[in-house]
Image (spheres, rainbow, N blue to C red):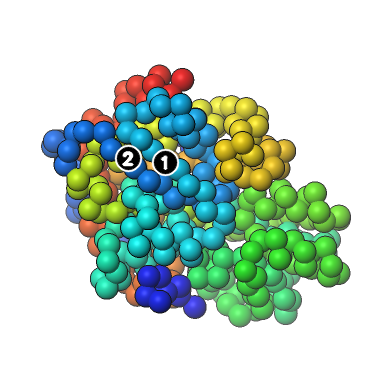
Amino acid sequence: MALSLGLGLTGCSNSGDAGSSTQTSNEQQSQPEERDLMGSPDAVTTRVGLIMGPPSMGLSQFMLAAQNGRTTNDFQFTLNGVDYVSLSASFNQGDYDIATLPSNIGPILYNNHDLQNHYKVISVNNLGVLYVMTTDPSISQLSDLEGRRVYSYGEGGTPEYTIEALLRKMGLTDTFSLEFKSTPFEVLNLMQQEENCVAILPQPFVSLSKLMVDPLYVPISITKEWNQAFSDTGSQAVTTITLVNQDFLEQHEQAVIEYLQMAGQSVEWTLGHMDEAADLQERLGTFLNNAVAADAMPQIAMTCLTGVEMRSALSGFISELYNADPDSVGGAIPDDGFYYMPPVGYIDDDSIGEAQAQAN
């Protein structure tokens, strides 16, 4: 069921090719241009809505820099738990200028021309983070789930449609019953209560389950299965993205550029300092347990892709979701206008280094 919104690995990179797309080739698509930044050069308050967990766990250095007044613009971060539906609605109501959301929500917003605001995607935050976990030691591959009831979280979001597209590709559609719960914690409670229970959850909730469920087996990485199944197209699983209100972008592009620079340096630092980064999660509200965050961080496919790399990774994934269920991306594959291309020279190694020096 498609979500009805508003209707009722390294630092950020702006070059290269992160994977082939089933859409038009990059040569036929718009490329970064040498141009001046749009809008005002003056610093501005920038309201950022975040999902707790993978899309925010790499932003600790950025958040600390903003809190300590070490950014040019005033970035105000708000954590919204795991409720991406509420965050999407608030974003469309104008409560935020920038927001992290599941990757299929961006196309839904972009394709809905009745919404009061319009949006562009500015970065990919996480690639695949889904895993099968179970208390049944006999399960070792997806075909072992035939006839089973499998719990999950993320109905109407990336988890549901990633699983749906993968099963379709593997010829396993409708071989098991996928039952969605409203929060990951409901799923974890069922894992504790039911014998031989099976669930598909994203990290870091898989790591959290290790504290709650014994015995626990994690026999299948959905990302690994995806990469094998879609090796013919090179499509990558993409879990979360960052979107910007188009009006804000046009009026304050310099703030969006600083956001991407700071996010890029923060992700880069986190990848090299995972233990230190994990120790900041509770303090910043990006996750609820530092020890669990430390266990999960190597498995949340943290990244910060922009420009051509972002478009290549995301467009291929969106195409596969569309092929499995057009409603999952709002009924159409987004055109090139969905993807924000920073001007040449603003998101590169030098700009990331400058942002890192500013944050430290």
x, y (%) of residue 332?
32, 71
Given residues 23 and 104, the one toward you in this image is 104
The residue wearing badge 1 is 76
Question: Residue at horizontal 21%, vertical 33%?
Answer: 42
Q: Quadrant of residue 334?
A: bottom left
Estimate the spatial distance between the alpha carbons at disc 1 and disc 2, rounded to whole Å: 7 Å
Name the residue type under label 2: Thr
Q: Is residue 298 at least partly visible in the picture?
A: no
Q: Quadrant of residue 192?
A: bottom right
Q: Earlier in the sequence, mark 1 or mark 2?
A: 2
The residue wearing badge 2 is 45
Given residues 30 and 24, the one toward you in this image is 30
Circle 1 SS class: strand
Above or below 30: residue 11: above
Residues tagged 1 and 2 counted as in contact (Cβ below 8 A): yes
Question: Residue at horizontal 62%, vertical 69%?
Answer: 182
Above or below 159: residue 309: above
Name the residue type under label 1: Gln
Dot 2 crowding, Cα within 10 Å, few <14, some 14–19, many 20+: few
